[in-house]
Amino acid sequence: MADPTSNSAKLPVDSLDLRLIAATQGGLPLVPRPYHAIAEKIGIPAEEVMARLERMRASGAIRRIGLVPNHYALGYHANGMSVWDVADELVDELGERVGRLDFVSHCYRRPRRRPQWPYNLFAMLHGKTREEVTAYAEEIRALLGPACHASDILYSQGILKKTGLRIT
């Protein structure tokens, strides 16, 4: 799996970039032409907004521009972080394969904390029922095969507000 720090910013971020980040970090405006609304707000052409955001994304200064759905509002009430004890020599390769599954929203490797926590691969699963999430976990187990020694599913008890770094 890719190192999340390997795409570090290669281009400097100037004061206009910082204003653009501040204007977009809480989300894009829910209007038909959000980049135009941002452009008007900070006083630059919409084309420059789009070009600067793409340059910062390509350089790694920002990771992505994307939608953050409310799974509960969409009817997905059984949200579980599946955790896997996978052979260390295969965890990167298998994690890439798990991360490509349609029903996995994100997948990543983390260090084990033995003896209490043997898991080194995490994959977030969303389903309408726990039975659906369990079936997804069984698909992952089949994909992992004998490289998987143990697993569990940690179900969400509520929704947390998801935010990233805020620049003021």
Image (cartoon, grey):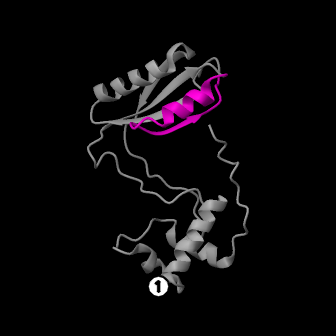
Left or right, 8 with reference to 91 = right
> Is residue 167 or residue 43 the one in the foreground?
43
The answer to whether 25 is drawn above or below residue 107 in the figure is: below
Image spot of residue 73 (x, y percent): 28, 49
| Residue 111 in sight here | yes
The residues colored magenta run 89-113
Image spot of residue 3 (x, y percent): 67, 42
- Residue ID at (51%, 20%): 144
Image spot of residue 118 (x, y percent): 59, 20
Q: Is residue 70 magenta?
A: no
What residue is disc 1 on? 40
> Is residue 153 or residue 3 the one in the foreground?
3
Q: Secondary structure at mark 1?
A: helix
Q: Residue furthest bottom?
A: 43
Q: Is residue 98 magenta?
A: yes
> Is residue 116 or residue 45 the one in the foreground?
45
Instruction: Classify the position of the C terminus by image quarter.
Output: bottom right
The answer to whether 56 is drawn above or below residue 92 in the figure is: below
Left or right, 98 with reference to 56 = left
Q: Quadrant of residue 59?
A: bottom right
Say few, some or many: other residues with alpha carbon within 10 Å of mark 1 (under 14 / 14 to 19 / 20 or more): few
The answer to whether 43 is drawn above or below residue 33 in the figure is: below
Image spot of residue 96 (x, y percent): 55, 34
Q: Quadrant of residue 54?
A: bottom right
Q: Amino acid type of disc 1?
A: Glu
Instruction: Classify the position of the N terminus by image quarter.
Output: top right
Numbered marks: total: 1
